[in-house]
Image: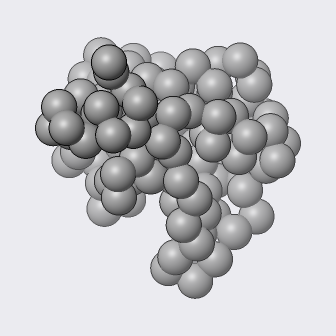
Amino acid sequence: MTPADLEAAALALPGAELAVQWGDDRVYKLAGRMFAATDGTGRRLSFKASDVAFEALIGSGRAVPAPYLARAKWVSFADAGELDGAEVAGWLASAHGLVAAKLTGAQRRDLGLQP
């Protein structure tokens, strides 16, 4: 998956925003809360995962626990370019959903995430 494809997939999610922080890292957020991030080149990808996905991705060796965020069930891939685009889009949607579930009802309504 190219960095442009990854960015397009992340920003296609309802209410998703991009922030450049910590130097040149690209951080994808929902209501100010992170759900995914890449380094400045778009190669290293990290995102919030469900408990099951975290264990499966780490256990299989496909991903490693994300530095500083592993306790919050974030995983990291060294090279997003080697990953299947549809699979990454699904992981991003799941990460977005995990963050959306923690928002208040009013926040979800304001972002168009629920009627």
Which residue occupies the foreground of this view, 47 or 29? Answer: 29
The answer to whether one can see residue 66 in this image is no
The answer to whether one can see residue 68 in this image is yes
Q: Residue at x 50, y 79 (%)?
A: 22
Percent x, y of residue 51: 25, 23
Q: Residue at x 69, y 69 (%)?
A: 40
Left or right position of 105 against 97: left
Percent x, y of residue 42: 72, 56
Left or right position of 44 against 49: right
Percent x, y of residue 97: 37, 26
Left or right position of 54 against 81: left
* Residue 42 to residue 21: above or below: above
Q: Residue at x 61, y 39 (%)?
A: 10
Left or right position of 11 against 106: right
Which residue occupies the foreground of this view, 18 or 52? Answer: 18
Quadrant containing the N terminus in the rendered view: top right
Task: Using the rendered view, name the quadrant where residue 73 is placed.
Answer: top left
Quadrant containing the C terminus in the rendered view: top left
Task: Using the rendered view, name the quadrant where residue 105 is placed.
Answer: top left
Q: Please, which residue is most extreme toward the bottom here?
A: 23
User: Count the marks: how many?
Assistant: 0
Q: Residue at x 33, y 21 (%)?
A: 114
